[in-house]
């Protein structure tokens, strides 16, 4: 099946996308028009839409181009936005989320996109798709807007804590994603750390630092390792891939979102504080629109579970059609690059290198 | 000595401040004029200035009011900005930082302020001042600007990882600081966590959550416990005190700083992108100045080591006189509230409560 699709060496054009149409705060009202936007961007695509056929049908009727390329598969079951992962595993079978992932598992669809509950999507993805050999726990990778192009930051919350080897795996997985999404041949990688010297308790980070340095020098990794980076350097785009364990990574991501919102509120207040400021803001409207566009979270919507034997994209639950289309874009770029197949091969080579380093008496 | 200073019940007016005049990127050029600003704000203060008497003298000569209230204690020794904590401990004796802390230890000065190397200041403070009974490891508390008043966030990097009991101690120490700086009688406390449910590996955070909930209910804590908060809620000022272990806390703080800088760069670019935007920005100048003022990091300069048996304030190394004066303000507020003495008493009561909870079979 893969072979038939090849259009140029190494490129596998995605054809069929599985959509959990019910996920997210407004369900089909975001996911279905989102798919329509994705179809405009990638006219070769077709869609499997899983969920309530009546609600999906109402949206599809407004979008004839999409309707011609969409198949609706009805289910009454939906994983609730507040369901616990364990509940999703026990009772999620046959839900729109489950069916979308199952279509990836059976290789009917090239990838799945859901704006549903993150924990449930992680649990179901892991159960249905499994991880690639060498990876025990998937990571969630985020595209982080920087003053350059977005950087890939992982893990942003799939797991708390990470061993040195897991941090090394994150580096390799993030590299694969930077390559898939941005076409960077040899991405740069940094390890997030705190600046204070000789702090106790970051042994895993320090060990991973040594291993990554040696592995990168050996040339077996496909990335350039740039050493430690600090939180204030992420937004500068100082490296293409930022590696961190999931607790600190999630807190960093949320904190950046919160800070952006906070400054947005300050800015609004400042621009309405006097008549002169208001007039100035009207005059500078184009500038503010440019700023708004650059800070638009919909531009980089789409967290990815890396390390799975298949592609599952998490769209922000509160997203609109444009944001959902961005999430589909992420899956498209990943599927097209053959990331899963390449990751398996790269991991095998990388682990062989790590094993050599780890038994090196100098390590 | 303490008794003599009481001017109203519970208020201990600070009189003499120990300044590490050599710390920071520009040393006496920031610290000495910073002390002069502090003197304007608090006319009752006197200063001990530790460092190179020639360099300090050059600055003092420009500031006659300060000169009349300052005593210079000469030393040739300075802890380098890149010195490791262990080096500071071995070779820092007699340095300007050491002497400033020693003046607090001997109770000659009410508190010490340094813009020097954080790790060295932490190590020397801990060695010279020791911790209060019940605290093994001090925490660094930051004032975090929010859309309300600043919140206290700790630990932002003194240590990596924290046990449940240490997180509980942070809650109590942060509460004491919020009371000292902002006069909040019953501060609200939140525990920073990730949103994903059932994530493994945050046992300490979960245990602390249970203990804090019970302890707050028992009424023995002096704070209201609001439960978990996420990274994007810090900037909303949702609680007065945010508790987190030092690795994630440091990364969050740095990430927020980086995001603010990044958005500042976007804004500048947007406001110079066209002639109309430039004109608008000129017209809205007052608004932008207001924004700049609100985002000014000098307004909330001054990290504090909490849990020490004495007050040591860390000013940002790159600060200017105004920022250094803010750091002195932090120490002033803390000393005035008698935070160290109160913390010792409160900790004893709190630990008695925690011990009751921890042996509760339902805990």
Image (spheres, coloured by chain):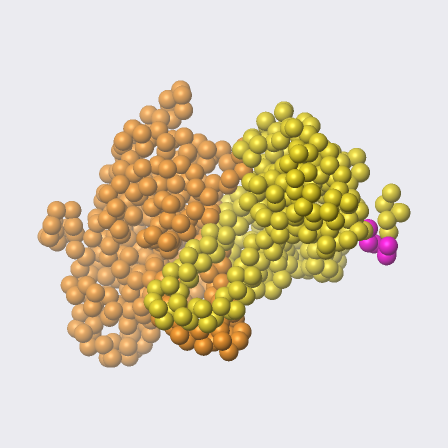
Chain colours: A orange, B yellow
Q: Is residue A310 left or right of residue B98?
A: left
* Residue B203 part of the magenta-drawn span: no
Q: Is residue A142 left or right of residue B259?
A: left
Closest to the observer: A324 or B58?
A: B58
Against A48, is A250 above or below? above
Q: Is residue A245 left or right of residue B142?
A: left
- Residue A183 visible to an observer of this rendering: yes
Closest to the observer: A361 or B354?
A: A361
Q: Quadrant of residue A362?
A: top left
Q: What secondary structure is the magenta-colored segment mainly?
A: strand
The quadrant of the rendering that contains the N terminus of chain B is top right
The residues colored magenta run B7-12
Label count reads 0
| Position of residue B280 measured from the top left corner of the image (x, y, whole percent) | 42, 71
| Position of residue B249 measured from the top left corner of the image (x, y, whole percent) | 55, 48
Against A275, is A154 above or below? above
Q: Residue furthest right?
A: B4
Q: Residue at x 59, y 53 (%)?
A: B298
Closest to the observer: B345 or B64?
A: B64
Q: Quadrant of residue B114?
A: top right
Q: Residue at x 73, y 47 (%)?
A: B64
| Position of residue B291 measured from the top left corner of the image (x, y, whole percent) | 52, 64
| Position of residue B121 measured from the top left corner of the image (x, y, whole percent) | 63, 36
Q: Residue at x 38, y 53 (%)?
A: A146
Q: Residue at x 24, y 70 (%)?
A: A36
- Residue B356 visible to an observer of this rendering: no
């Amino acid at each position: 099946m893969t072979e038939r699709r090849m259009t140029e060496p190494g490129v596998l054009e995605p054809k069929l996308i599985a959509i959990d149409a019910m996920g997210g705060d407004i369900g089909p009202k975001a996911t279905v028009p989102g798919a329509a936007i994705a179809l405009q961007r990638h006219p070769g695509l077709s869609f499997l839409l899983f969920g309530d056929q009546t609600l999906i049908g109402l949206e599809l009727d407004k979008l004839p181009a999409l309707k011609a390329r969409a198949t609706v598969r009805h289910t009454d079951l939906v994983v609730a936005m507040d369901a616990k992962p364990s509940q999703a595993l026990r009772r999620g079978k046959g839900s729109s989320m489950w069916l979308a992932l199952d279509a990836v598992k059976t290789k009917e669809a090239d990838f799945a996109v859901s704006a549903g509950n993150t924990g449930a999507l992680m649990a179901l993805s892991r159960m249905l798709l499994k991880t690639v050999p060498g990876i025990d726990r998937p990571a969630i990778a985020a595209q982080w807007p920087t003053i350059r192009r977005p950087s890939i930051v992982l893990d942003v919350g799939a797991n708390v804590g990470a061993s040195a080897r897991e941090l090394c795996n994150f580096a390799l997985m993030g590299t694969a994603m930077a390559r898939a999404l941005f076409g960077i041949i040899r991405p740069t990688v940094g390890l997030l750390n705190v600046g204070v010297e000789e702090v106790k308790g970051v042994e895993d980070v320090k060990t991973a630092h040594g291993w990554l340095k040696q592995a990168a020098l050996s040339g077996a990794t496909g990335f350039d390792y740039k050493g430690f980076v600090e939180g204030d350097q992420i937004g500068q785009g100082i490296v293409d891939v930022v590696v961190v364990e999931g607790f600190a990574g999630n807190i960093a991501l949320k904190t950046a979102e919160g800070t952006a919102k906070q400054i947005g509120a300050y800015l609004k207040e400042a621009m309405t504080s006097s008549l002169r400021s208001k007039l100035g803001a009207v005059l500078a409207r184009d500038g503010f629109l440019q700023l708004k566009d650059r800070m638009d979270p919909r531009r980089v919507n789409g967290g990815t579970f890396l390390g799975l034997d298949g592609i599952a994209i998490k769209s922000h639950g509160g997203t609109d059609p444009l944001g959902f289309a961005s999430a589909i874009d992420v899956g498209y770029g990943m599927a097209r690059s053959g990331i899963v197949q390449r990751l398996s091969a790269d991991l095998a080579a990388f682990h062989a290198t790590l094993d050599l380093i780890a038994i090196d008496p100098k390590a």
